[in-house]
Image (cartoon, rainbow, N blue to C red):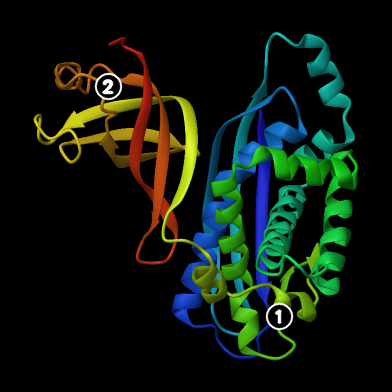
Amino acid sequence: MELPFQHTIRFTNEGAIGLSDLGQTLIAHEIAFSLLPKILERIFPGLIVNRFAYELALLSRNSPAQEEFIGKLFVNVQETVEEYIKSLADRVGFDFMKTHSHGLSLVVIAMFLIGGLWAWSRLNPATPANVHVQGDNNVVVNLTAESLGITGDDLRVIFDDALSAHQKRQLERASANVFAPSKSEIGATVEVPGVYRVSPETAAAIPTPEMLEDADPLEEYETINDAQINVRATNLDDREHGWAGLIKISGRIWRVRILWPSDVPLDFVKRMSDDSPIVADVIIIYRPNRTGEFVPKIASVQRVHSPGT
């Protein structure tokens, strides 16, 4: 089964947007798109997103600057829940997704607004939520939820539960980058044509990437249980620096340095190979790359499940 995808975002700035800012908005969308399957699978229990194929169909930096993405999500439902399949076909939200190519665009703009609210609240913990940021959130979340056949409160819980702490930070930074171009002009904002126009006050209030960079630590951590890692040796006798691995995180394969616990015998470590992936509980250490995005760098192995030691 295929779900059509079309998402257009327009920046109302009167002047051209800088190439670096535009590049960051593209990276922000890539992050949001990588998280979208997790959100959809929580909205529609039993739904499995097998693949999300999308492409940039239009890019313009002159006024009004605009980015247009098109694509498809390839999905199915679990074969063991036949009754759910029947009810799923009748669900208002799923039917809306199948028949409206901009339906997923609602979810994306809701993601950016929720990420912006999270960022604002994290930087202002002792202050009530900004009235403009909160107001746009309420409108878009409720509008999106109604289209999906759920309540706004349900959708907020889904966003909160579906994403790990690290993924929430990713979404916060993505939101900051999407709204950053609007801050160069008074009254500028972001809109999804025909879907929703964010108020200029909200665009101005959402924290800048620099504000988040100042507030964030130089490292972030995420625990992943039962991770499958293809191990590669670069120096068999160096437990701390001589091992790397390939691990799948949020649908993407990353090459990371492997740190082995002291109770794993070095002889066991040396038996690891590309042909024999291990399953282990790990702590992923994220560090910022040159664009400021936090990416996996180190996998600190806590416990090896298979092959056994």
| 132 is higher (above) or lower (below) than 31 | below
In the picture as drawn, the residue positioned furthest to the front comes out as 263
* Residue at 83% in and 54% down: 141
| 153 is higher (above) or lower (below) than 276 | below
Distance between the alpha carbons at the discs numbered 1 and 2: 52 Å
Task: Say whether residue 77 is left or right of residue 83.
Answer: left
* Residue at 59% in and 42% down: 164
Which disc, if any, is residue 263? 2
SS state under label 1: helix
Q: Nearer the viewer, mark 1 or mark 2?
A: 2
Asked which quadrant contains residue 126, the reply is bottom right
- Evaluate whether residue 105 shows in this view: yes
**Label 2 Cα neighbours within 10 Å, binned few <14 / some 14-19 / many ≥20:** few
| 287 is higher (above) or lower (below) than 249 | below
Q: For mark 1, what is the residue?
A: 204
- Evaluate whether residue 70 shows in this view: no
Indicate the position of residue 37 as horizontal and vertical percent values: 62, 38
Indicate the position of residue 10 as horizontal and vertical percent values: 67, 72
Indicate the position of residue 55 as horizontal and vertical percent values: 51, 53
Under mark 1, the amino acid is Ala
